[in-house]
Amino acid sequence: MTTANDSELGPIDYMVVEFPAGKQNFNGEMAKELTSLVDDNTIRVLDLVIVQKDDDGGFEALELDDLDDVGELAAVEGTLAEILAAEDVAHIANAMDPGTIAAVLVWENTWAAPFAVAVRNSGGQLVASGRIPTQALIASFEADADTQGA
Amino acid sequence: MPLRPARAARRGVIGAPVARTAAVVGTAAVVSHGVDRRMDRREDRRERRF
């Protein structure tokens, strides 16, 4: 019998989203979109840490359950697997601007797992994967347009 | 509250240093240029066949 633990693990990504002081508007919109992705089985949230960096460069990290009111995010607490190590959080804090708050999210791309299985069943194997920066895409198309216009 | 103690004993997974990325917001219009280009090429191939 196949259990949830036997199912294929999808690729795991992370992002750090920084909120400068005075520009924070935590109105629940992010939580709603995130839980929607979880509900659709598009992703599974594996870790979520909040990092506050002082003006003097010191930082404090908070676990999701340290927060008073997490709203809809309470729905993802059950899947958190504490992926990040303390040294990861320190490296992330180093990259943050002083006086900001950052949300660090780690998620599994659950949507990709069935496709990966299909690829393997078809004899394929992963050689490379990655993310194409939007800047590179824009630059490529602009260069193309310049060539055609010349 | 600090991070849970178990995180301190764990090996890092994202590597260091963490590089800041430029925040560029792209719209679907960015790739629509590529879609148009592909359609043009398909038209060209079709015309060459006749």
Image (spheres, coloured by chain):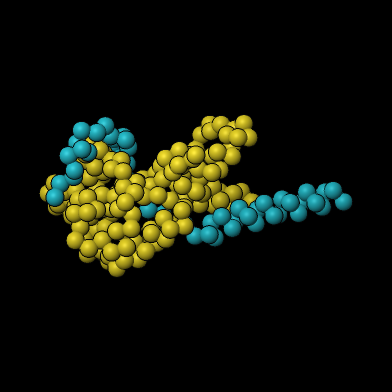
The chain that appears cyan in the image is B
Q: Is residue B14 left or right of residue B6?
A: right
The tint of chain A in the picture is yellow
Q: Is residue A84 visible?
A: yes
Dividing the picture into quarters, in which one does residue B40 lie? Answer: bottom right
Q: Is residue A117 above or below residue A56?
A: above
Residue A88 point in image, percent of width and height? 26, 39
Which residue reaches farthest right?
B50
Q: Is residue A49 left or right of residue A57?
A: right
Residue A142 point in image, percent of width and height? 54, 52
Q: Is residue A1 above or below residue A98?
A: above
Report the residue at 54% width, 44% height from top: A114
Residue B4 point in image, percent of width and height? 19, 43
Q: Is residue A98 visible?
A: no
Report the residue at 33% width, 54% height from top: A76
Residue A22 point in image, percent of width and height? 22, 64
Which residue reaches farthest bottom?
A27
